[in-house]
Image (spheres, coloured by chain):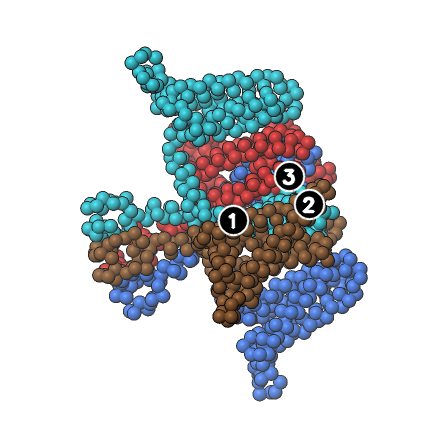
Chain colours: A cyan, B brown, C blue, D red
């Protein structure tokens, strides 16, 4: 660094590095991103394979080495990211900076706590960043529509989840008393787990009512579950329909006077300033 | 009580008590409510832990004492509520007064009927009151939107549940004849329980058809279940969409000039004639 | 019958009988219907109880007698219906006449084929008639809205069911080859049954894939099932929303000129004849 | 072929053959199609029956012969199709040409690879062609509505499936660490399979959490699954409602007098000015 650039100047190589790592407009940037996607997928696959007993026995050493190879690769990449950004601190505390660090830690931690390397799969979250970089913008706008619908209905969803939680506590307690320990309902937490398994219609069958009273109660819970599962679907659907309706019913026409958007297709006058459209 | 206050006067301390217990506008009232939430959650957790065999063996005595501590605390709170309201009788017969009593009884009952203390978890319903007091009004309006949607579709839901009940009786009887006792379908009530488990797509697997005919019948029931599970969802969704449509899109305001309706909530000018709304 | 009334005259007692049995406007008619509902529910409960082994051992004789009592009662009722209607033949071939006969046969058949008496529960369908008689008209209009929505989407539902059937045949065959007899997938029909259990998200677990390839295939099927279960819900919901929209958006106003209904709320002129509304 | 017809002339018999095989307007064409449907259903049933052990033992030889009979029949039909079309190469590479070949291969392959004959059931896909030929046009328009709705929401569905895949990888890894091999979660792929089984609410129960921490995590996943299953339903429903709204309510026709849009499909007069449309 020359003395003429005080405090982290965007010198040529730094700017170029930023272009390559964070952007996907240049050929080099695109190649870097595709290489990164491949590395992430390969490294996650490695960890998955390592967890299979029969494969671990035969190829454990090789897989561990591949895993370390990728971890060191990602560590270098992380350091390069730190170097290329203007404000490294802000980067480390951003969502993607946090995911990057989280994706590195498990392998290092596994030196002290064996088993934690399997948390390595969290680096699959890094794919989110790559997709963002690749400018899959149409997909992103759809994703944000979905997110928007979920965000707009967050209060309804909170009320719904709270209701479900109160319900499962009460249902679980009743089943604990009705069925009791001899039929597997050996504590209230276990019975609450059963109630969640039933209300969500998952129904593992590891626990199921044995007594006539228990079966009757379970039947009521299941029929209630019918209505309950309808609620989140109704919330999300109504919200998505709203979004669709809103975007379609209004024209893209702007008022010639006040330039505001959002007029209905049948509007003759601007609803904000009253001038003729 | 001074002789100048005939019949339950709202003396200073009584009013203040009411403010603290029933309202959440003052600092003391808020502190009381937060303390109450914590007590409810703690006491319910205590009962849950007590139901776990391994914990009961080790800490049963301590947990029972904590449970009694909270029960006495809630009893005192209940008496204070009775004292602070103007019409205690009306309070005891209100929904929340009933929940309050219901939350106390199980522990006292457990002196005579061991096991009933687990019904103690019903006191989690008291959280509803606290949320109400904390004025989580936005959440409440969402809750009442949901409630409204369910209420508006109560007849459709009744028809739906009646249909499901008739269906499961008939399906259950058929499966009882087809599969018979040797495959676990040992009575019509049991078979009806199976039919409910299947139609609601819970599918525990504690009972499942063994014969080819039984499997064919079950397959038909499941495909039918597809359509059936769609109905409550459709009902709730259509209702929620209606509510959203009604409340969001238009005001009931008519244009003072041309008297036309259907203006957006944010419209300042009539979209048909351009005059000020 | 007097000679002055040729061919089934509606004599006084016949008309009164018809009023009592088929209508619910008079006190006697209402009493008859309520008695009938009670009889149907009681007789179905009797058959259910009889199917429970422990109860059958103890009270089998009593229950069989009660069952015969109700069957004879319903036989008499059926004959009275035949007598009181003007065209008995048309009645026997109507939907409810068919249900009535179907509700009687099982007990008589059980004299020759033991076990068929459990089909007796089909008489619960007779409740449909009683509800109709009791003029629960608001519920009926809701029921017909639901029916209408299902009827309007019958073609979409047919296409959907056909697609599901083709899918489960192909998925079933693939799983049969992948998993094979040693893992319980012992024939293609069994595998198709598994595919239906999985696609409908029932998931008994009596059959589940054991091999890695089988589990991968099953995972794909389940994720596909996500999309598939959305389709019937989407169909029914869209249809119900349409119905709701249609009934609300149009006014009940009739054209003063051509008397036709179905005008939009914002219509100024009749859309059929062009005259001012 | 006479020298006067260069390159595949549509001679009389060839045109007639095409009419019979590919069309359904003539009596012969209809008979051919119905015969084909019957043959496809019969041959698929044969393969299914052959896969049932008890039937194979008794009638294996007969079934194999029937299977070969149909395969030779379909081979002849395939050759006739090739002969009757003008451009055989384009036909073989079309979707239905590909399905036709796929429907023949398994039986021939089974000479070398026993077991592949069960893939024979893929010929059930040929039914799609026959339905197309039979001009079930109303059903096809409904099918294309459904297809259109799914196509229009393909990006939202892609985003959704990608999110689900990222989720199950992370959930699966966590459960592998929490539950471990002793409770059946013997590798990350197996745990991911469990996560898919749980999130889709299938819930076989072949794998279910045993530890308190595992059950808690599973409960969170299930409640999350509530929201997740709502998303595809919401997407499809919103899309279908849009389609219904668009196609049913208004025509794109403008009033010739006042040029206003939004007229119902059955409107004869403008609802705004009353002039003839």
x and y percentages locating residue B2 in the rendered image: 51, 68
Task: Pinpoint the chain carrying mark 2.
Answer: B
Which residue position is annotated with label 3?
D212
Which residue position is annotated with label 1?
B34
> Can residue B186 be seen?
yes
x and y percentages locating residue A147 in the rendered image: 43, 40
Helix, strand or loop at mark 1: helix
- Nearest the camera: C262 or B250? B250
The residue shown at (60%, 40%) is: D216
Q: CA distance from mark 2 to mark 1?
A: 24 Å
Q: Quadrant of the C terminus of chain B?
A: bottom left
Label 1 Cα neighbours within 10 Å, binned few <14 / some 14-19 / many ≥20: some
A274 relative to C225 in the view: left or right: left
> Can residue C228 be seen?
no
Query: As displayed, is residue B166 above or below residue C134?
Result: above
Task: Pinpoint the chain carrying mark 1.
Answer: B
Task: Pinpoint the chain carrying mark 3.
Answer: D
B233 relative to B248 in the view: left or right: right
The residue shown at (57%, 64%) is: B92
Question: Disc number at residue B62?
Answer: 2
Question: Disc number at residue C265?
Answer: none
Q: Find residue D15 and report its image quarter.
A: top left
């Amino acid at each position: 660094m020359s003395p003429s650039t005080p405090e982290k100047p965007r010198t040529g190589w730094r700017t170029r590095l930023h272009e390559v790592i964070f952007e996907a407009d240049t050929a080099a940037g695109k190649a870097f991103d595709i290489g990164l996607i491949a590395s992430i997928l390969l490294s996650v696959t490695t960890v998955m394979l390592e967890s299979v007993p029969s494969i671990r026995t035969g190829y454990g050493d090789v897989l561990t080495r591949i895993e370390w190879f990728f971890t060191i690769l990602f560590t270098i990449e992380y350091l390069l990211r730190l170097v290329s950004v203007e404000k490294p601190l802000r980067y480390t505390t951003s969502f993607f900076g946090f995911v990057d660090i989280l994706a590195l830690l498990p392998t290092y931690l596994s030196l002290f706590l064996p088993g934690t390397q399997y948390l390595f799969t969290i680096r699959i979250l890094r794919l989110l960043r790559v997709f963002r970089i690749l400018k899959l913008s149409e997909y992103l706008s759809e994703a944000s529509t979905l997110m928007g619908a979920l965000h707009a209905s967050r209060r309804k969803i909170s009320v719904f989840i709270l209701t479900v939680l109160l319900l499962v506590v009460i249902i679980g307690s009743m089943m604990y008393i009705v069925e009791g320990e001899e039929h597997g309902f050996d504590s209230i937490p276990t019975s609450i787990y059963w109630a969640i398994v039933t209300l969500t219609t998952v129904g593992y069958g590891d626990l199921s009512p044995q007594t006539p009273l228990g079966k009757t109660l379970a039947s009521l819970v299941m029929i209630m579950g019918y209505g309950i599962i309808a609620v989140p679907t109704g919330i999300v659907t109504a919200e998505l329909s709203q979004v669709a309706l809103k975007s379609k019913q209004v024209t893209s026409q702007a008022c010639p006077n006040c330039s505001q958007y959002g007029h209905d297709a049948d509007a003759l006058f601007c609803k904000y300033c009253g001038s003729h459209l």
